[in-house]
Amino acid sequence: MKSKTNQVIIIYILISVFVAIVSHKLLLQYISNENLPFYTFTKDLLFVLFTGLIFKLILSKNDNRNVAIFEKLKNTNDEIKESNEKYNIVAKATSDTIWDWKIQEDSFSWNKGIESVFGYKEKDVDDNSNWWFDKIHPEDSIKMSIRLYSFIEQKTENWQDQYRFRCADNSYKYVLDKGFLLKDDTGKAVRMIGAIQDITKQKEEEQRLKLLETVITQSKDSIIITEADSSDAKIPNIIYVNPAFSIMSGYEAVEIIGKSPDLFNSPNSDINELKKLLAAIKNKEECLIETISYTKNKEEYCVRLYMIPIYNLDNELSHWISIQRDITDEKKQEREKEQLIRELTQNNKDLKQFSYITSHNLRAPLSNLIGLLNLVEDIPIENLELQEILSGFNKSTHLLNDTINDLVKVIVIKDNPSIKKEAVFIKEIFENVFGQLNFQIELHKPIIKLDFEKVSIININKAYMESILLNLLTNSIKYKSEHRKLKITITTHEIDDTVVLIFKDNGIGIDLVRNRDKVFGLYQRFHNYPDSKGLGLYLVKSQVETMGGTIEIESEVNKGTTFTLTFKNRQ
């Protein structure tokens, strides 16, 4: 800067000296006095030097002022540059979206966060506040606008609000928006600068925690949270209990916070279970125990306790959560159930003994009676009254014999809950059954249709299946309609791993509205036929269920009956 000033002064002096010389020569042409030109030239030269000096002082002073201004501008620019760099670094570090709103002009600008956080390209963003308000969730927009403009009218400096902001993909993010208001000399709001922070994860976590809090407070199970570390071989001290704990134990939260749950132990508590719990706490492992605890009133109750370790983000044990359930009633029911099982087991033994006596010990004297009655039949008896008595006695004895034979059949099934099953051809079973009923089939000539194309082999007990089909066919023939020819249809099909056998006839049917609950009962009769004993369907159901199958019936009076038998078709 000084070299330029010196250059200007030298140029000024040279030009001034040149002008003085030219002027002096012109003056010599018109003035004859020889001393006057020299005097004039000297005077002009001194004037040039003097004015050059003055001019240099002025320029030097101006240069100093310009240097000061330049340095000030340079410092200001450096500060602005540093401030912008800090602003950009902070914006990147915080992932905030910065906005600048010139209120009077309604001019709006955003930093790059509008793209990195919300996905909007620069061309998608308008430079006015309407674009901003349009992206706010409809449920939040009115509320947020009222708060914002109320804030501007009140002319306070700091503002913040939470709302949902729409992203470029039309999803919404929860945001925390903070703004700072700038005012002019008259106090009028002219500009507002703000930063939007994405708090979606915090909101989701907050909602999750509220949900968990609701679950804990509304849970019927007692929930205790304790510290991580314990001392003196005790369970860690309690820092929280839910309302269910107070109901279960009788202790209010303020009474037990800061104390160890050891105070709930009863003299009758299971020592081995407590040792198991302490070992799990020492090893930082989950633990499930059942023990006896004390209420505040020193009343005992059974509790099932599940202890769970909780770890923080650094994988360090931070707390223990204990979930407790009062199982006093459950334990009582278990004891009652065990007692009932013992009684039922004993009753079953007694019934089996009775069945053995009925089916074996009575058969010998009953056979003797039948033999004696057969002998009596060969003896002529003239007394009519005695003949009638013996006839009735003979009839009752044979009925008793039939009843015992029926009971033997039932006992055989009930004493064999697990029977051997094998894969057999269904057609082969029917051939054996038809052979046994050949006389009845020839006599009544029913129309029998068999369809075993879909399933021809079934995994069952062959003897039981023959007995089942024998009973069903016998019943169909016995209870056929007198007004139409008997038709019997037997089909099989497969559903998943089961085989379904459908047995259908057009006989006289059963009134299931009145008798559905009794249809498979022992000695249940639904028709007044002389040879009907009410045992067949009971045996059928017992044999089907013994093989692990099920049987269902659909029937309508004077239309017929359909039996659906289902068996698992696995070895």
Image: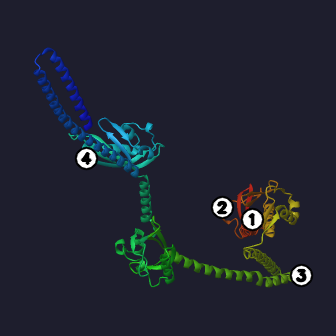
- Percent x, y of residue 253: 36, 71
Of badges 1 and 3, the one in the foreground is 1
Q: Which residue is mark 4?
A: 156
Which mark is on residue 319?
A: none
Q: Nearer the viewer, residue 16 or 182?
A: 16
**Coloring basis for residues:** rainbow
Image-quadrant location for residue 118: top left
> Tag 3, which secondary structure?
loop
Residue beneath label 3, please?
378
Q: Secondary structure at mark 4?
A: loop
**Three-letter amino acid code at the position of disc 1:** Arg
Residue 61 vs residue 215: left or right? left
Q: CA distance from mark 3 to mark 4?
A: 128 Å
Dot 4 or dot 1: first in sequence order is 4
Q: What is the distance, in whole Å, between disc 4 and disc 2 at their CAs?
A: 85 Å
Residue 198 position in % (x across, y down): 41, 50
